[in-house]
């Protein structure tokens, strides 16, 4: 049975990935005549916030208007327009917001600045756009807020020259006979007859400069669709004609706006998806003019009330804001059987929702709301509603959750096609192909990975180690330690994990691949990531942390008050061993060079020996050490110093290195173990407890982007790294 928190995660993700599939099965009408490209902010957001990926991909299935602004460079203009023209077929209508009037956003100033400083700049700015679009079918949203700032009492638009420049824009844009122009009007100017009359005067004057089809209302705002339809009626009355019609920006208006605040409003939710089938006679389109999730601005003190959130610069992706928009919006709250309207008052909607979509009774941020969501969804799909057995609901949600997940066909991965020098053989493959999941595996979106000596030793050793060889057709992956988020489940015994879980663990030695955007991992070698550390820190734990835990606990049987000697205390294994041993209550002695002595003491070492100045066998009393842990530095010391240093009969020597000489028979009854770590979830879970109680931490030597993996491995090959070398695949 799933717990409330699992319902929360499971239900939300199930809906987000089902949204597109449901749209085709229940008749959701898209504005097929409109076309746009994915907002560039979404591409970066999915990398930085993989937990939002499924939600953002749902939104990408709809036309989100592309913004052409004077904050973009000429190169950025060319790239955006090229993408738009190439990705949108000739029979669709491009949707473009034109936002570059001189002195734009003259009131708040959050979007001010840019390359357009004069009328001549503006004419060049418009020509660049119209030359690229040519005679393609296009819908232009013309200059958000400009008419509102021009016509309101005391508005800054008049002195900023907005009217003359708007005429220039209308003339230039309507030269294309296939263009539809909707001039943006602030909703507040249409609330009253007197102010609507001022808008009508300006719109009639603009109509004399070219062909204007109507106005857009609610751009980047939160007013309900019902409310905006009323404003459109006011506009047409002021015009004395219904020839001009309206578009409403529904990108954030699901809950309407109970406040006059306009900047990153806390109560906002993503509104009804874009469509031309509005069900309202004077509304031509519902559009997402403002990309859901992009900030309105910094929302500084004195500009807004406590109903808004401070955020980053206007136009940048705002993660906290997006989470609220998604949780409080159409895809989690709305749908075909939801009787709530698009106003904040939740009165009955006389017009049934023409679009359809997934629905539930109540969502919000609480786990109980998400369980109600699951119950309602189950009822919609033939289960028993609120009295349904939890197992049936679990089964339905899991099916919904996993059946519609889509993975990219290819991804970025570090691979090699031949054995040899790892610095020469490893390459970045941007077209790596996903492998099928085995029943006991999960697919993980990698956020961070860590370098180990095995990463280059395997490539150097060749087929003698792996028993198989890579090729051009079947290259091998690189990397073992990994931390990331589960995005897909195998169909076997993976019940302890869910999609969305943050995990850390190890890739199989014979099927490495942690240095990549995605990796398949067996559930026996992963665990839930400790909640109190970063993904970079988590990635540094599995290989060396598990090795040291296994050596000390499984082989060394280390007990409270026993004495441990660590050979190579400043290695990653050594630093974890110091902390684990102290947590077990042991006395710790470690060897290292002088430059690392203080670091080891800070980790808890009771005694540190500078191996460059003295031999530990000469420093320590005979038969005084219970356990020697060689971190691969001095495996042959078993044959000499260890024999006189380990306690008689009970002493234990464990090495993870390879002895060059045959091991001698113990003269004191001590025991020798030469081990290769076996990854097991129980080790990771034990380490998680120590991490979450602040008993151990990851020491990081350096962090490298995936593209610099060769430099990271080169650093590991020096054997002088002070802690773990991290490969950061995604910025946290």
Image (cartoon, rainbow, N blue to C red):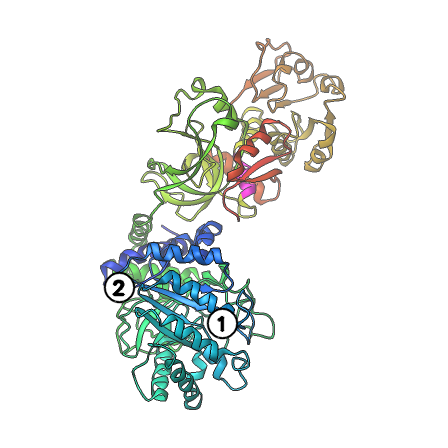
Residue 28, disc: 2
Q: x%, y% of residue 609?
A: 73, 25
Q: Secondary structure at mark 2?
A: loop
Report the magenta residues as a range. Answer: 536-542
279 vs 713, left or right, is left
Judging by the rendered image, the residue that carries numbered circle 1 is 101
Q: Is residue 41 magenta?
A: no
Q: How many marks?
A: 2
Residue drawn 52% across the image and 87% down it: 153
Give the camera-side residue of 31 and 18: 31
606 lies above or below 666: below
Residue 4, disc: none
Which of label 1 and label 2 is nearer to you?
1
**Real-space Cα separation, disc 1 to disc 2, in angstroms:** 36 Å
477 vs 354, left or right, is right
Q: Secondary structure at mark 1?
A: loop
Give the camera-side residue of 56 and 165: 165
Residue drawn 42% across the image and 22% down it: 466
């Amino acid at each position: 049975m799933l717990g409330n928190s699992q319902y929360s995660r499971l239900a939300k993700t199930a809906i987000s990935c089902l949204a597109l599939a449901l749209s085709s099965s229940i008749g959701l009408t898209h504005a097929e005549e409109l076309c746009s490209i994915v907002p560039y902010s979404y591409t970066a957001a999915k990398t930085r916030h993989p937990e939002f990926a499924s939600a953002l991909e749902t939104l990408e299935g709809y036309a989100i208007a592309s913004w052409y602004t004077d904050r973009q460079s000429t190169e950025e203009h060319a790239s955006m327009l090229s993408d738009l023209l190439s990705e949108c077929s000739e029979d669709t209508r491009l949707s473009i917001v034109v936002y570059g009037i001189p002195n734009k956003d003259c009131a708040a100033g959050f979007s001010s600045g840019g390359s357009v400083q004069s009328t001549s700049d503006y004419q060049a700015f418009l020509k660049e756009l119209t030359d690229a679009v040519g005679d393609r079918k296009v819908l232009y949203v013309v200059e958000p807020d400009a008419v509102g700032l021009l016509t309101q009492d005391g508005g800054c638009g008049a002195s900023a020259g907005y009217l003359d420049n708007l005429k220039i824009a209308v003339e230039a844009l309507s030269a294309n006979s296939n263009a539809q122009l909707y001039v943006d009007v602030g909703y507040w100017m249409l609330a009253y007859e007197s102010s609507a009359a001022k808008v009508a005067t300006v719109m009639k004057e603009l109509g004399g400069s070219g062909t204007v089809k109507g106005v857009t209302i609610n751009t980047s705002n939160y007013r309900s669709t019902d409310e905006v339809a009323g404003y459109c009626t006011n506009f047409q009355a002021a015009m004395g004609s219904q020839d001009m019609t309206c578009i409403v920006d529904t990108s954030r208006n699901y809950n309407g706006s109970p406040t006059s605040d306009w900047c990153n409003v806390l109560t906002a939710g993503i509104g009804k998806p874009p469509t031309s089938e509005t069900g309202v006679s004077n509304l031509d389109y519902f559009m997402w003019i403002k990309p859901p999730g992009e900030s309105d601005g910094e929302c500084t003190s004195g500009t807004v009330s406590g109903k808004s959130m401070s955020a980053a610069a206007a136009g940048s992706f705002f993660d906290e804001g997006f989470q609220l928009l998604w949780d409080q919006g159409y895809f989690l709250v709305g749908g075909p059987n939801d009787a709530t309207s698009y106003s904040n008052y939740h009165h009955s909607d006389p017009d049934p929702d023409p679009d359809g979509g997934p629905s539930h009774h109540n969502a919000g941020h609480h786990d109980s709301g998400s369980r109600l969501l699951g119950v309602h969804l189950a009822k919609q799909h033939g289960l028993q509603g609120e009295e349904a057995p939890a197992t049936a609901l679990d089964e339905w949600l899991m099916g919904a959750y996993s059946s519609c997940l889509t993975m990219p066909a290819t991804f970025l991965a570090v691979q090699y096609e031949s054995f040899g020098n790892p610095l020469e053989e490893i390459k970045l493959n941007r077209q790596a192909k996903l492998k099928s999941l085995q029943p006991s595996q999960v697919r993980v979106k990698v956020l961070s990975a860590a370098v180990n000596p095995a990463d280059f030793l395997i490539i150097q050793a060749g087929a003698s180690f792996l028993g198989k060889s890579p090729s051009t057709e079947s290259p091998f992956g690189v990397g073992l330690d990994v931390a990331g988020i589960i995005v897909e489940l195998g169909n076997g015994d993976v019940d302890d994990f869910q999609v969305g879980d943050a995990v850390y663990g190890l890739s199989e030695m014979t099927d490495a691949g942690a240095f990549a955007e995605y990796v398949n991992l067996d559930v026996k070698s992963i665990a839930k990531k400790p909640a109190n550390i970063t993904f970079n820190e988590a990635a540094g734990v599995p290989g060396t942390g598990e090795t040291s835990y296994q050596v000390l606990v499984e082989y060394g049987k280390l007990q409270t008050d026993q004495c441990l000697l660590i050979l190579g205390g400043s290695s990653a294994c050594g630093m974890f061993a110091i902390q684990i041993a102290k947590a077990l209550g042991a006395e710790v002695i470690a060897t290292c060079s002088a430059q690392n002595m203080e670091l080891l003491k800070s980790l808890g070492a009771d005694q540190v020996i500078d191996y460059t100045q003295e031999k530990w066998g000469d420093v320590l009393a005979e038969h005084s050490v219970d356990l020697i842990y060689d971190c691969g530095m001095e495996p042959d010391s078993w044959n000499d110093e260890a024999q006189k240093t380990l306690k008689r009969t009970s002493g234990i020597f464990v090495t993870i290195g390879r002895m060059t000489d045959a091991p001698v028979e113990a003269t004191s009854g001590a025991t020798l173990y030469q081990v290769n770590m076996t990854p097991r979830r129980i080790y990771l879970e034990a380490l998680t407890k120590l991490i979450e109680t602040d008993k151990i931490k990851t020491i990081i030597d350096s962090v490298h982007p995936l593209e610099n993996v060769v430099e990271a491995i080169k650093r590991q090959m020096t054997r002088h790294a002070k802690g773990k070398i991290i490969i950061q695949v995604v910025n946290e």
